[in-house]
Amino acid sequence: MLQNKYSFNQSSTELVISGLPDYSNNDDNDNISIVSSWKLSILNQPEIEGSIDHLKSVVKAFYKCATLSLLDREEKIKSELIDINLDESGNFKITLKSTKPNVNPLKLNIGYAEFSDIINCFDQLKNFKKIKIDFNDLMPNIKKKNIFSFNKNKFTYNVVPPLLAFFTISMFTFISIYFIEENDSRNKNISTISNNTNIVIKI
Amino acid sequence: MLLLAIETIDLNGSESMFAISNKLNLQHLFPSKVSIWKLRSNNPMRKSQNTNNINNDQFDGLIKITSEMSKYLYPYIRAIVSSKDNYINKPELWNDFQSRYIELIEERFNTESIIVRNLIDYSYSQEFYKRILFTLSLASSEEGYTRLKFVLSNL
């Protein structure tokens, strides 16, 4: 039985999927339902390949990362097979972990341009009818942000300054009141002493 | 801001948007170039701001136009993003984009507003420009429309 092979290209990236049709699923000869191998080539980067589980894990992580980036939520993506996070220079730092023992993780550093090429390739794969991969589990399940959820940036820029101002004003007010009262009580003491002395003089 | 970025890359942007809307059979929503312009004028940062309500179909139509336009412009969008990623070696494209984007913002938006002043401040907003282009590049694929709609509805 001949293997089918399809490739998806976008600028710097090429995704190649090889596999076989599943005749028990009424597949045509040119379909792929059983993915035997896949390969992702990115310009100036080492090739990535693996099993269907790896592919699903990679697609899921990339889709989630893309959506979170667009929503301006900087969250690290960690899974058993792949980690993605943004480094200080604004590039995507990708760590691919092998399931084979004694194989070091593969680290890639890619820019926004390459990242969007990869997403483009995955989108082509998703919409290609001849390869039957269930993408329903791979789409990001991102919940709407709760209005009351904690946002560090919002807290720093919107809540901290008024709180600080309120605290400073309160402190100044309390200190001022304390000194005024202190001053008043000293004045009262002086006046009672002077009154007493008057009384003594009268006697 | 996304449509303005498209106009920055495509000098004939407003014409192209109208042509794309016709191609997508959106004549009932956008019968003329002015109708697109009117909807775009809903942006509160604009100098001549309109307060028309955008209905769901019009919102959807604008997303479709944005996604379709970014499909056509993807090679340019990618080249500009790549120039920013590799700024030390190839700064020209990014600099050109940035200066024209700022020019357009100054021309169309109310520069008295603090938000707009921050937008035209290069050092403050260059990451924002990059994000706008990144959004367009992710909206350019076959899933782009769905992705962009999801993101804009969840901001």
Image: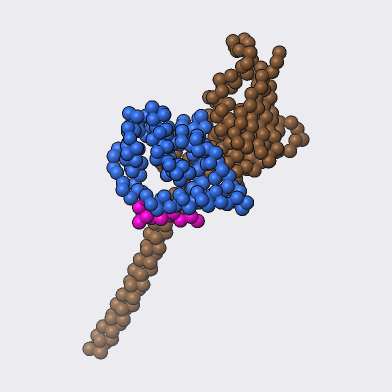
Which region shows up in magenta? B109-123
Closer to the camera, A87 or A200?
A: A87
Confirm whether residue A94 shows in the render.
yes
Membership of B120 in magenta stretch: yes
Q: Position of residue A109 (x, y in %)?
A: 64, 43
Q: Hue of chain B?
A: blue
Q: Quadrant of the N terminus of chain A?
A: top right
Q: Hue of chain A?
A: brown
Closer to the camera, B90 or A58?
A: B90
Q: Residue placed at 29% from the left, 77% from the top? A: A188
Q: Residue placed at 61% from the left, 31% from the top? A: A9
The reply, left or right, for residue B130 in relation to residue A185 is: right
Membership of A21 in magenta stretch: no
Q: Position of residue A98 (x, y in %)?
A: 70, 33
The reply, left or right, for residue A201 in relation to residue A44 is: left
Q: Residue placed at 68% from the left, 41% from the top? A: A44
Up/down of A185 relative to B102, above or below = below
Up/down of A114 relative to A131, above or below = below
Q: Say how many tags the image has.
A: 0
Q: Residue furthest left?
A: A202
Q: Position of residue A149 (x, y in %)?
A: 44, 42
Closer to the camera, B9 or B141?
A: B9
Figure quadrant of residue A191: bottom left
Up/down of A43 relative to A202, above or below = above
Q: Position of residue A96 (x, y in %)?
A: 67, 36
